[in-house]
Amino acid sequence: MSQRSFGSPLIGRDDELGRLAGVLERARSGSGQAVLVAGDAGVGKTRLLDEVAARAGTVGATVVTGHCVDLGDVGLPYLPFTEILGVLAGDERFSGVLAAHPAVERLLGAAPDSSRDADARLRLFEGVAGLFADLATIAPLLLILEDLHWADQSSRDLLRFLLSRGVLPRRLAVLASYRADDLHRRHPLRPLLAELVRLPGVERLEVRRLADAEVARLVRALEERPLSDATVRDIVERAEGNAFYTEELVAAADTDGMPTGLADLLLIRVEQLSETAQQVLRTAAVAGRRVGHDLLRDAVGLPEEELEAALREAVGRQLLVAGDGDTYAFRHALAREAVYGDLLPGQRSRLHGTYARLLAARGGGAATAAERAYHYRESHDLPEALAASVEAADHARRVGAPAEELRHLEAALDLWPAVPCEARPAGEGLDPVSLTLRASAAAAHSGAAHRAVSLTRAALAGTGQDADPELAARVRYTLAGNLMTVDNLAAAFAYSSEALAMIPAEPPSRTWVWAAATHVMAARQIGDDDTALRVARQALEVAERIGATAARADLLISLARLEGGGRRTLEGRERLREARELARSAGDTPVEMRALFSLAIGCFESGELRECLPWITEGLDRARRSGLLSSPYALEMRYLRLLVLFTLGQWDECVRVARADPAPGFAEGPVLYIALARGEPDVVERARALLGEPFDWMGTFVGGIVLTDAAALRGDPQEAVARARDAIAVLSDELGRAPHVTVRLATLALAAVADRAAAERRGGGSTDRWSGVAGELVELARATAAGQGPEGQAWLARAEAEWTRTVSGPDIAAWEKAAAAFADGDVYEAARVRLRYAEALAADGRRAEAGEQARAVRETAAALGAAPLLERAETLLRRSASAASAENPVSPLTAREQDVLRLLALGRSNRQIGEELFITGKTASVHVSNILAKLGAASRTEAVAIAYRERLITPEPTAQG
């Protein structure tokens, strides 16, 4: 399908081409695969993909290409996929397949959206995936995505969805290229690439720079006329292995005063065109990397014949290439950037204005709003840029792209003060405070919690004394809710109190009910349960009276924790189920997700781990359908799902799920726990990365656990205690209340302290120093474990056993109790505790029982792949076996070999041994060889020495003189 144009020879790419050809061959054979093609700008990624596409076409594959475009700060959701679908829609061969997937019509602008449709985003993603799978059944399908470094977040999300489904559809290959040198530290593509390369069926291909000899070959191949060796050497030196630089240097080889910069070099080639062709090229550069013929014609304002002549000239000089759908593209993005950068400011502004007006006149629906916003802004037509930004934000919300919605809303807010009042868009919610509140919601939904707080604070600053009380209250309770997500609890309570005081409870209103619901959560967070319970009961009655269904659901969730035995009880869960159904009926997905998370965590806290998973699955499904996978409760559930799998000992499944559904930050914490337990490298560095700015409570939670445990495993009690104390101090709230994880952190630090105390006790030293530290840690564990469920009580049992081990030595009864507490919980921690129990038994001389426990630990550690724990279990087993052998040595030798060994000790030769034992000398020699092998001895003398040491023989009695 795709007719890609290229003329330069492919040199020095045999390895890369071989790998990609193998990917295509495996796809043709039924094994789908994806390759992320990385390389510096101009290194030859596009030329390599051209060759692969051509080869794929010759063997009957369908080849379609989508390009990502640099639109500055303005994103155009799903642009490369829209291009691909547009090409497919233009081919009658695929009309039936497209008709079978109506969801994809949303990207083609053929079907209306509803922002209330919570399933829209998932249907869109599944529709696109289903379409590609069906196309691949007709013929092998090669999807090429170019310039992924410019991809909008929605396109990145869709690519993640396509590649994260475990196995790619049969006969589908995906090749996605990106500029590696464009990926600065905070580039949004970096975390996605890190996630994708860990997925099954996804690999990374680095398109390296060409070697000097390969560049020289390329120079000779590009230029038919002979070039001097000096010229070739000069080009090779200056090209630095970059294929595009090489081509440009060769093309400009005859130019006097050859430029030193690539931009100058490119512009020299442009200036060799006719004035009309240069005009067309400059106009095309403002449109972007690619432009349609009709749009370019209208923008440049030339008669058709002149335009075609100019285009023919530009294509002939290989500055533009003709593409699918009557479009033209710059042969390389660097060429477009050079031409665009050479325009005078006035030229750029005028041409952007022209494109904006043309796009507006053509219509095209919301899909072009982002492009119009970009062109209007660059043309300094700020009123139109503002209106288009708002329209683009609306479109992003409809297609479930909160990150793009946020960017467009922030662009609109940035433009708002510069646009005269009479030129601003009018309508409900079209004021700075309302737009800022909406932007804060988009930030929260996309996982940018701190940005959500900043935006809501900006909305608060924008509400004056004469502001509408309901809007002012809404700003304050929204700010309170956002502050709770970043654990600024005291401020959240203060703002929720202000919100509740700003509007009367009577007459009842939805604003008051939501203010009350937020205040209930804030009061509970700071420990004021009396206030929370009183306000919740009052607000629930009002919510029922006025039919505020979603708020009623939210209040029921809070009451499930405040009344009775909490969410761990059957009564609490029944109330949460009711809240889930109410939220679903009201179409409020965030509240529904809160209910589902509460149901899941209630099961976890009560030790019902397997019952937890269905609630998590349902919650994440709702999040996926609504574009809320990065929202706070979704992230919590993603972490909890992995934590349950980790706790159950399903480690490989845990890692697989994390790779298939990569999550940012703390949500992959259980994978870090596994990496530490398996002794993998870089775990400490990955954990430290979670402790950076801005502060993240759960990131600090996970990082604290990993760093404390890592120090304990290294045998560094000072570091373990310091890490535990730091984490507890940072995670404690404004009232000084320690978090529930304190019992775990204190126990992990206690383990390191107990190890050091045991070592010093064996060496005859004093353990007083460590006894004091252990006492402090065990008191922390006791204080925070009170009221916790089975998990907290198990950690407390281990803390008590570690404390006793520190102050007086191992206590069998304490470790037996701890082992029983973990028996039905955390598989890994249960094994670690059983090993301590085994060590206590061995110290008491109960070696048979110790061996039984250690063998069980060895089996578990081997199944988990926990190499350090496995090594400790085997060490204990070896020590027990050695001690048993010392008491009752068992010879590895047969009876005949024992006789031979006795004679060896008397200095007999092989012949003498044979004579005394009535065997041949040769047979005696064989027995001697066997003895040496079994005892690991290099000589007869060494074998005798080993036999004496291991008490396999005893010295013969000597005659008395």
Image (cartoon, rainbow, N blue to C red):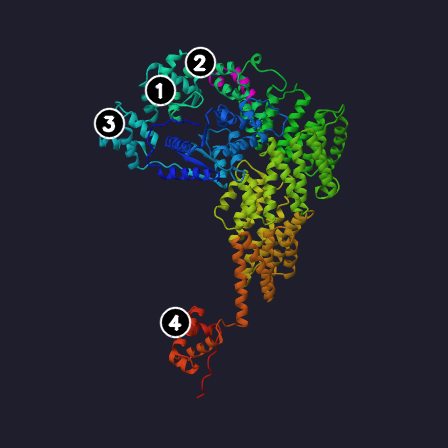
Task: Using the numbered discs, state the Cα–Cα distance from disc 2 to disc 4 in whole angstroms.
Answer: 96 Å
The residue at which mark 3 appears reads as 225
The residue at which mark 2 appears reads as 298
Residue at 59 percent across and 66 percent down: it is 848
Task: Using the numbered discs, state the Cα–Cα distance from disc 1 to disc 4 in whole angstroms.
Answer: 86 Å
- What is the quadrant of residue 946 in the picture? bottom left
> Is label 1 in contact with label 4 (beta carbons under 8 Å)?
no
The residue at which mark 1 appears reads as 314
Between residue 631 and residue 773, name the one nearer to us. 631
* Label 3 or label 4, whichever comes before in sequence order: 3
- Secondary structure under tag 1 reads helix
* Quarter of the rendering occupied by the C terminus: bottom left
Q: Is residue 384 magenta?
A: yes
The residue at which mark 4 appears reads as 939
Amino acid residing under circle 3:
Arg
- What is the quadrant of residue 321 in the picture? top left
> Is label 3 in contact with label 1 (beta carbons under 8 Å)?
no
- Secondary structure under tag 3 reads loop
59 shown above or below 652: above
- What is the quadrant of residue 442 in the picture? top right
Task: Using the numbered discs, state the Cα–Cα distance from disc 3 to disc 2 in whole angstroms.
Answer: 40 Å
Left-right relation of 316 to 422: left
Mark 2 Cα within 10 Å, few/some/many (few <14, many 20+)?
A: some
Q: Is residue 138 magenta?
A: no
Give the residues drawn in magenta, as a range. 376-392
* Label 3 or label 1, whichever comes before in sequence order: 3
Amino acid residing under circle 2:
Asp
